[in-house]
Amino acid sequence: MDIIISNSSGRPIYEQITGQIKNSIITGALNAGDALPSMRLLAKELRISVITTKRAYEDLEREGFIETVAGKGSFVAQKNMEFIREEQLRKAETLLQSAVDVAKAGGITLEELSEMLLLLYNGD
Amino acid sequence: MNNMIEVENLCKNYPSFQLRNVSFSVPGGSIVGFVGENGAGKTTTIKLILNEIKRDGGTVKIFGLDNIRDECKIKEQIGVVFDESYFHGEFKAGDIALILKRVFKSWDEALFGEYLRQFNLPRNKLIKEYSKGMKMKLSIASALAHHPRLLILDEATGGLDPIVRSEILDIFLGFIQDENHSVLFSSHITGDLERIADYVTFIHEGKIVFNRSKDDLIDQFGILKCGQQDFQKVDKSDLLRWHKTGFGYEALVSDKNLIRRKYSGAVIDTATIDDIMLLYVKGEKS
């Protein structure tokens, strides 16, 4: 499993970890039942605080992506891929709605907004 | 999770310096970084924890035991490294092992040998011929070789190059894989603390200023930078400390996201531990 942390990205480290693990699970790089490294081992390898990895794992568990079994470790949960996709779609839709609201209030046209979306998605 | 060290309301009076109501703890499986200016009270606190000097008030528990009543039992399980090597210059590494073997029941000769190899410390050289860095590495090897549960270091890595320091930090990270092990280390090399500390305890003029998780400090503290005019408009109660520079103002804030939203467009940098200490010590309070 690859996890790349950036100290200068501005995003809190625990968020970077949860983001990358979620992504691995959604894209199928990690499968249900796969074992994750222990919080302590991950902290050691990434040279970060155990508190950070603990928080990342707790967030992942709360959102149902992983399960932690005391004494055994953390494993990717049996999650319904359809369900995850639905959730992600819903989140994106909510955020896009906010952008639409802001655009309408600010007199930004659909063309301008679409162009913005294209630029952002393709990562300038 | 149990606390390896629990310090409560520790006090010590000297004619020109007082340690006042120092309280903090070191949880099991964690690395606590202890920072403060020279003379702030770090070494005094550590000496009080180790019962090397007599306290004037407060309590110290190590492994849940009283640090005075159970001193011997406790010290069997602590590895201590100070900023100077106290080994006699006429000894060699092997002589140190002979002595410490009789001091610590759990002395591990093989492990000591491994550390000597890893740190490139020649067995047959007199310690007085060791460089500063080598003396420090020998102290660290000796502290680790009796399988302690707790490591206490007081400015121990000052003279070491970045590569060796990195190796030592890795040793600490390996050390705390066991939740019943902890590290308390005071250091001026705040970059090291930023990398591996779980908690940072900041002491200033004999009092604890804060005791927070390192992540909180890095994620939430920030340095607001602005010009004269903008500074007049800032609500001073949002600032922990501020400082006028030749070309503007710098201020320490404890919730940078809140400040970002409140003063949109303002420059807000991540605060390093150095920044935080500097502003606390040199900055003005609102």
Image (cartoon, coloured by chain):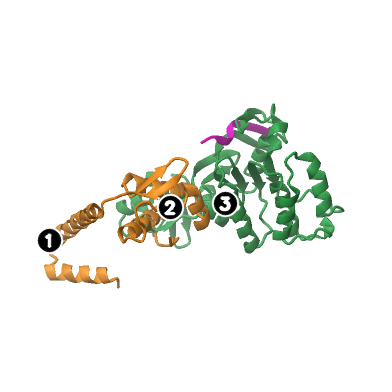
Chain colours: A orange, B green
> Circle 3 is placed at which residue position?
B173
| Depth check, front residue: A124 or B36 | A124
Q: Which mark is residue B141?
A: none
| Depth check, front residue: B42 or B85 | B85
Can residue B122 be seen here? The reply is: yes
Q: Is residue B232 left or right of residue B37?
A: left
Answer yes or no: are tags 3 and 2 on the same subunit: no
Residue B259 at what x, y percent from top left? Answer: 35, 51
Residue at the image position 85 percent from the left and 52 percent from the top? B91
Q: Nearer the viewer, mark 3 or mark 2?
A: 2
Q: Is residue B77 left or right of residue B90?
A: left
| Depth check, front residue: A83 or B46 | A83
Check disc 3 and report its element: helix, strand or loop: helix
Q: Earlier in the sequence, mark 1 or mark 2?
A: 2
Q: Give the Cα separation between the discs numbered 1 and 3.
A: 52 Å
Give the class, few, some or many, for how many residues have Cα within 10 Å of label 2's Cα (few <14, many ≥20).
Answer: some
Amino acid of disc 2: Leu
Quarter of the image with the C terminus of chain A is bottom left
Q: Is residue B156 above or below residue A122?
A: above
Q: Is residue B22 left or right of residue B94?
A: left
Residue at the image position 22 percent from the left and 55 percent from the top? A82
Q: Which residues are magenta?
A: B1-13
Q: Give the Cα separation between the discs numbered 3 and 2.
A: 19 Å
Residue B110 at what x, y percent from top left? Answer: 74, 51
Does the magenta segment cover residue B255?
A: no
Check disc 2 and report its element: helix, strand or loop: strand
> Circle 2 is placed at which residue position?
A36
